[in-house]
Amino acid sequence: MSSQKVIFVHGRPSGHPLHAKYGASVTNHFTYEDPWFRWHDRHYSAPIRYLAWFINAFYFIHYKKCIVLTEGLRITLVLSKILSLGKIKLIALVDDESPYFIYSRYYSRLSCGKFVGIPAVFRLDLHWKE
């Protein structure tokens, strides 16, 4: 049985401590979301950010035979999957407001459909009682 390399992608300055522990239990290869064009902790205008997303997406294309575990739904990795013609396997660790945005369709099916799995750290209870 062959095992695939797993890469954990996180934001800057580092991943959330809980996410980092989870990532460390799966892999020892960590990388930033923005290795070529640093934008995640900088205040750039929208067009510069969009350019940075595309530039950094090309960085992740060489991970075609790997599983990319990411801290949240990252647009850079969605672009990488599209540019690699679907050869990158993405798994997003979600424990923020993203499940609500997926449920309410604020996040498009185009971006969410690119992930192999979206494990949630908590249960989203959509049935509130008064």
Image: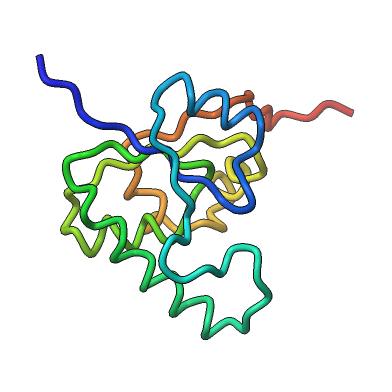
The residue at the point 47 percent across, 55 percent down is: 33
Tell me where residue 30 appears, x and y as whole percent: 44, 39
Question: Does residue 57 lie above or below 16 as drawn?
Answer: below
Question: Does residue 40 lie above or below 100 as drawn?
Answer: below
The residue at the point 44 percent across, 46 percent down is: 31
Which of the image's four quarters has the C terminus? top right
Question: Residue 21 vs residue 29: left or right?
Answer: right
> Which residue is more in the foreground, 128 or 81?
81
Question: Does residue 71 lie above or below 52 as drawn?
Answer: above
Tell me where residue 12 appears, x and y as whole percent: 61, 53
Tell me where residue 95 appears, x and y as whole percent: 62, 34
Q: Quadrant of residue 75?
A: bottom left
> Which residue is more in the foreground, 127 or 63?
63
Question: Residue 120 vs residue 16: left or right?
Answer: left
The residue at the point 38 percent across, 55 percent down is: 77
Question: Residue 17 vs residue 118: left or right?
Answer: right
Residue, far left: 1
Residue, far right: 130
Which of the image's four quarters has the N terminus? top left
Tell me where residue 8 appears, x and y as whole percent: 43, 38
Color encoding of the figure: rainbow
The residue at the point 63 percent across, 80 percent down is: 44
Number of marks in the image? 0
Question: Does residue 47 lie above or below 121 as drawn?
Answer: below
Q: Quadrant of residue 100?
A: top right
> Which residue is more in the foreground, 126 or 99?
99
